[in-house]
Amino acid sequence: MLEPVLKFLDDDASNALERLQTLLRIPSVSTDPQYGDQVAEAAGWVADAMASIGLDARIEQTDGHPIVLGHARPDDVMADGPRVLYYGHYDVQPPDPIDAWTSPPFEPQVRDGALYARGASDDKGQVCTILEALRAWRQVHGKWPVPVSVIIEGEEECGSVNLPKFVAAHRDELNAQFVAISDTGMWDRQTVAITYGLRGVQFFNVELHGPNRDLHSGVYGGAVANPAVVLCRVLGGLFDEHRRVTIPQFYDDVATLTEAQREAWRGLGFDEHRQLLGPAGVDRPIGEAGFSTLERRWARPSCDINGLYGGYMGAGTKTIVPSFAGAKVSFRLAPNQRSEHIGRQFHAWLESHDVEGCRWKIEQLGSADPIIMPTDAPYMAAAQRAVERTSGRSAVLIREGATLPILTDFKSILGLDCLLLGFGLADDRIHAPDEKFDLACFALGCRTHAALLAEL
């Protein structure tokens, strides 16, 4: 039954690309209130797409951006097999800086076998691999092989604030065997990856306030505490000479890597310069001593200063002692760490410093715990078979250093594990100018999701 579905996908490829381009033209930037109407427009497009496939679709309003939910009707399902709950997001990151794009971010353009636009890979293109696979099955056979539900949200890029409440309120309606997600990457251009582990996250905005106004540095310089100088001193102490985080108890709960895990990851043949550093324009890796690049990304925690601000930042000079300085600080958390504990320790660590009379303002912006999925579940085996059928190669099992907060909510609220089957590439430039999605990866994603339904 699968071969006619795959043939339909091949024959309908140009129409599928056109549908994706239509969605990409909608600037659904969830983090910026000025794009509110466009985010709602994208939700409408997704709902219409679901309905056109044959799903019973509706838009659910939240306190933020809409959630789109669709279900297969019982009469449209061939067999009472395991229900699949598909998840994705239609919102995108801001396109800035605009002048760094080769073509406008919301005017999709095909170049050198890839589709360039904001959201092409993260996550509109990958969402459409699922929708196109569902469309093909319905067009060819009139039904889906197993029950399916689809939930597509519009707030993933700003923390998925309202989705957990929605999931909890609709627990019975969202009952399924597992959650299938395409929002991750392939191992390389020829090899599909199934991601079974993600790091957690904890992030803060911290500000250090001093004088009640900006002061003339000729009058006050050297006589009062400079918040920018003090903040740099404090944050500079986050790491020791081995690039380990100095916060007390930071590593206490980190799961120890086994030699078998390290050997398995070495066997993947990871080329850090070709697969990670080179596309980012970086010459050499750095990080916690005693661990490889993959081990640092997949199984060790990290800390980053994501931004610094304060004082005069315009052209020319303005000689002041700024009244305050701030920073965005985030932590990626390894298996067994808990975001709440790390947040408390960081807060206490900041407060333990002598800040020369300045005052802290500490704001926690969001968090999620790390998660590890079982690799021996039946749906994992089905995904492996689907990948072999469409790519001709076995999928590799990997972890990833990023975070999908909703995974922990699916687990804690619905009791569901997630299948992370993604088709992005390391050079897709997600969250950056010239984001792209290779057309070959788009086609492979559509075919693999169609094959997964057949295997289930």
Image (tube, rainbow, N blue to C red):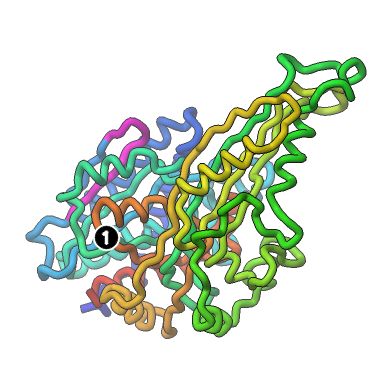
**Quadrant, the N terminus:** bottom left
Identify which amino acid the numbered label 1 is placed on: Leu
Q: Give coordinates of residue 309: x percent, y percent.
A: 70, 33
Question: Residue 307's quadrant in the figure?
Answer: top right
Q: Is residue 233 above or below residue 317?
A: below
| Between 424 and 290, the one nearer to me in the picture | 290
Badge 1 crowding class, 10 Å Cα cut-off, few under 14, some 14 to 19, many 20 or more, is some
Q: Secondary structure at mark 1?
A: loop
Q: Give coordinates of residue 383: x percent, y percent.
A: 33, 75
Q: Is residue 221 above or below residue 141?
A: above
> Which residue matches tag 1?
416
Q: Is residue 329 above or below residue 6?
A: above
| Between 322 and 88, the one nearer to me in the picture | 322
Question: Residue 112's quadrant in the figure?
Answer: bottom right
Question: Residue 374's quadrant in the figure?
Answer: bottom left
Viewer can see residue 404? yes
Q: Image point 45% across, 38% down: which residue?
A: 30
Q: Which residues are magenta?
A: 61-71
| Between 343 and 123, the one nearer to me in the picture | 343
